[in-house]
Image (cartoon, grey):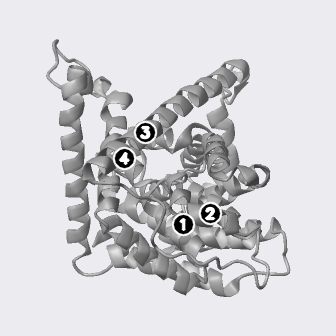
Amino acid sequence: MYGLDNARSLLGVIVVLAVCWLLSENRKVFPWRLALGAVAIQTALVLLLFGLPGSQAVLTGISGAIDGLAAATRTGAQFIFGYLAGGDQPYQVTNQPALFVFAFEVLPLILVISALSALLWHWLILKWITRGFGFLFQKTMGLGGASALAVAANIFLGMIESPIVIRAYLDKLTRSELFLMMVVGLATVAGSTMVAYATILAPVLPNAGGHVLVASIISAPAGVLLARIMIPEAPGQGGAYADYDSALKYDSSIDAIVRGTGDGLSVVLNISAVLIVFVALVSLLNLMIGGVEVGGEPLSVERILGVLFTPLAWIMGVSAGEAGIAGRMLGVKLTLTEFVAYIRLAQVPEAEMTERTRMLLTYALCGFANIGSVGITVTGLSILMPERRQEVLALVWKALLAGFLATVMTASIVGALPGGVFSG
């Protein structure tokens, strides 16, 4: 079925492209061919995983794999944390939902998936999958070898881990290629966090694992497109060649597991610290402005951002009646990270939000584009390429905007497709 909501999502794509064009460093140049190619790739990938016969079996397999990983991780977490991680309770439980503790239920997943990703990389499985996507982006979107590989790596690794894959080529990247790498890093998520998001959303969204996986994959070409619009590549520049013998190597399977776990621990600590600080800062701001009442309710950062982002949610394809709450979710994602936004989304009762809105928000929230990630990006890239730190600082806020809009564009593309595509 096709309706006005689907048509309005097309308007969302146009508005996002127009905003990036207005902010372009060279408005005389617009990559029309790249725009058509990016939209075509996004649409094709969605149809491939949701529209083809038998796709439901694939999605069921993804969901089953995620459930298995979550169950296995829960066993390990319970061994260390006992009843705090959902084990046998030493007392009578009267409020079952209150047993959910983010630190013990979700963060351990990141450790397990990080170690598993490193092992799959060492076994060349993940490396060949990344190489396949890199070849796809190189041939269909005209990216240089180094940029194509970095974009592909961002789909499965983190926004700091992926530059390590092309570390030998970082000094050869043009300003446009550096910006592109930053934008795609903020527009996508790591494989370790994908599973965590899917676990959070599974109770309220059918095929949550499939949607989260597809969201991160198809936001990559959206990030490439918006980056190229805002900072176009100068003719004759770019295209740094990169073979696929990357700098990311492990000595053995055990080394991969140990180092992958260590990398996962760094991610867990970063996520925990950022969440504590930003939730505290937003709470502090709410206390400062909470004395002002608007519409009978105290003013808050979430309410302000909800109002600001309501039009954005509406043009994304969300109905007028739900655009307000969707706008608030987008604001939470930008300020408090996508983790908090997904938790808030999962807490909305099924009867209070349509499946379409929940699905669109799943795509719009699936990216690292939040204020906390700005610091992580600057710190990580400054370590990898200290000689370009000032360049990174000059580009990072513009990259945050492009990365945020890339996920909005992805949600708009999904919203523009007929609803029957996702029903199998």
Name the residue nearer the viewer: 357 or 141. Answer: 141
Q: Residue tagged by mark 3?
A: 343
Do the residues under discs 3 and 2 have CB atoms within 8 angstroms? no
Q: Secondary structure at mark 4?
A: helix
Amino acid type, mark 2:
Met
Nearest to viewer (mark 1 / mark 3): 1
| C-alpha gap between disc 1 and disc 3 | 29 Å
Name the residue nearer the viewer: 43 or 257. Answer: 257
Amino acid type, mark 3:
Ile
Nearest to viewer (mark 4 / mark 1): 4
Q: Extreme top residue here?
A: 91
Do the residues under discs 4 and 3 have CB atoms within 8 angstroms? no
Q: Residue at x 44, y 81 (%)?
A: 44
Residue 207 in sight in this render: no
Residue 18 x, y percent position in the rendering? 75, 71
Q: Secondary structure at mark 1?
A: helix
Do the residues under discs 1 and 3 have CB atoms within 8 angstroms? no
Q: Residue tagged by mark 1?
A: 150
> Reading the chain from its start, which is encountered first: label 3 or label 2?
2
Residue 243 x, y percent position in the rendering? 50, 76
Q: Residue at x 66, y 24 (%)?
A: 286
Nearest to viewer (mark 4 / mark 2): 4
Do the residues under discs 2 and 1 have CB atoms within 8 angstroms? yes
> Reading the chain from its start, which is encountered first: label 2 or label 1?
1
| C-alpha gap between disc 4 and disc 3 | 26 Å
Q: Residue tagged by mark 2?
A: 181
